[in-house]
Amino acid sequence: MKAYLQRVNPQNGAVWYYSIQVQRDLLGRWHVIKEWGRLGSPGTMRQSPHDSMDAALNALSALRDELVNKGYKVVMQEGLHLSNLHKPK
């Protein structure tokens, strides 16, 4: 359950990336792990806990959709087919 996105700045060719994945910890909680930055530079990593796998997958899907709306392109995704996930109402 991963997605990797990139955005290229047309003025200077800089490539920005965003990696999102869902993992379960040893206590049974689910986490969305996000890493982003510019290629060639150290990135930033953050994680957010969720009570269920569905909640974590919906958060991953929502973030992916938000990034696509900002101009990022999905380069790779694996695991569950992310475009079929439903967002919470």
Image (spheres, rainbow, N blue to C red):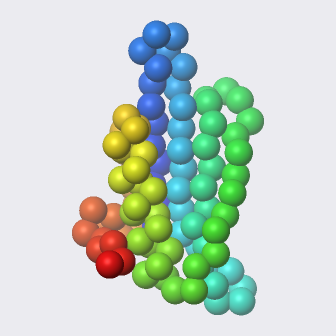
Say how many tags the image has. Answer: 0
Against 11, residue 83 (above or below) is: below
Residue occupying the far left of the picture: 84
Against 76, residue 14 (above or below) is: above
Against 75, residue 85 (above or below) is: below
Residue at image position (54%, 50%) is 19
Camera-side residue: 2 or 86? 86
* Residue 40 image position (x, y, % from top left): 67, 27
Residue 51 in which image quadrant? bottom right
Residue 75 visible in the snapshot: no
* Residue 75 image position (x, y, % from top left): 39, 42
Against 61, residue 68 (above or below) is: above
Residue 57 in which image quadrant? bottom left
Residue at image position (39%, 63%) is 61
* Residue 21 image position (x, y, % from top left): 54, 62
Q: Quadrant location of the C terminus?
A: bottom left
Residue at image position (54%, 31%) is 16
Left or right: 67 in relation to 47? left
Left or right: 37 in relation to 81? right
Residue 71 visible in the snapshot: yes
Residue occupying the far bottom of the picture: 27
Left or right: 9 in relation to 74? right
* Residue 78 image position (x, y, % from top left): 40, 61
Residue at image position (62%, 30%) is 38
Residue occupying the far top of the picture: 11
Camera-side residue: 30 or 87? 87
